Image: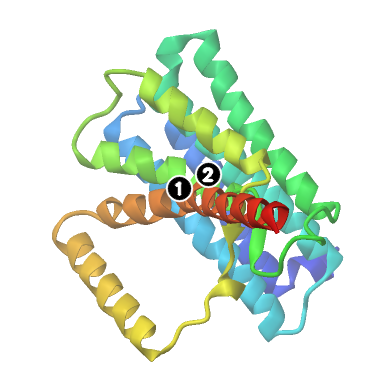
Amino acid sequence: MLKQFLSPPNWFTAASIFCGFYAVLLAGGADAGATQFYQAGLLIGFAGVFDVLDGRVARMTNSSSEFGVQLDSLADALSFGLAPAVLVYRWGLDSLGIVGLAASFFFMICGIFRLARFNTGAADNEEWDRSRGLTITMGGGSLAALVMFHAATGKSFVANPWGPFAIVLMVAFLMVSAVPYRTAKSLKMNTATKVFFALLFGGLILVGIFFDISFIVLPVMASYVLSGPIEGAIIAGRSARARARAKRQ
């Protein structure tokens, strides 16, 4: 066990766990308000950074292990399942009583089911550049970005909880769905595309500097969450037209 404590990738995973743990404490506190909600959302964002780094460090140091894989899944369940569920409940769903509680729990359990599906090898038959369903990291991160954006405007709680309720259910369903989402492996960009995205992200960084980082993160996260259903509908439409042409021939 000492070997696992001394493994560099596990340090980053532990940092992700700490961020999720602290986010729960901030969001669940009796005095939680706009400042605490913003900080909790930011911590979930940092958890995402550490989640990316632990895999990179494992590959760089050639220290990948089954222990690390399982630890990473547990970290994801806490930082992107439990922490966002607590955050979104305290921020916008607690006024709905048992309905809001059920929606928050449904989000968390869907995220954990998504992890279990991936860990048991259900993703093995997926296309190499697609993931089946929204990942728990992006699902939890999108809710955290939404809360951060709202808190950055100076508001603590939402006026109409049914909007967040619908968003939470949508994200939860997308995680356990078969909707295809592109992965980093699908990013094959030519020089012109790279220049375009460099300019785009440069502009977004300027927005973050002059306004708030959540003004960047939320549109990016929302675009990715919506990209799956949109691309899935396009693919389904093409398949339907191809089948129709085949029948006519």
- Other residues around mark 2 within 10 Å, as few (<14) / some (14–19) / many (≥20): many
Among the 4 quarters of the image, the one containing residue 150: top left
As drawn, is 234 to the left or to the right of 14? left
Q: Residue at x 30, y 79 (%)?
A: 196
Q: Residue at x 27, y 37 (%)?
A: 151
Q: Residue at x 27, y 72 (%)?
A: 200
Q: Can residue 240 be seen by looking at this rendering?
A: yes
**Residue that badge 2 annotates:** 140
Which amino acid is tagged 1? Leu
Vertical comparison of 158 with 202: above or below: above
Residue 131: x and y in percent read 66, 58
In the image, farthest residue toward the front: 249
Q: Residue at x 62, y 33 (%)?
A: 108
Residue 230: x and y in percent read 48, 49
Which amino acid is tagged 2? Gly
Quarter that holds the N terminus:
bottom right
Q: Nearer the viewer, residue 108 or 30?
A: 108
Q: Can residue 86 be seen by looking at this rendering?
A: no
Task: Report helix, strand or loop for mark 1.
Answer: helix
As drawn, is 121 to the left or to the right of 191? right
Task: Tell me which numbered mark, 1 or 2, is placed earlier along the sequence.
Answer: 2
Task: Report helix, strand or loop for mark 2.
Answer: helix
Residue 154: x and y in percent read 19, 35
Badge count = 2
Q: Nearer the viewer, residue 128 or 110?
A: 128
As drawn, is 42 to the left or to the right of 116? left
Alpha carbon separation for disc pair 1 and 2: 15 Å
**Residue that badge 1 annotates:** 226
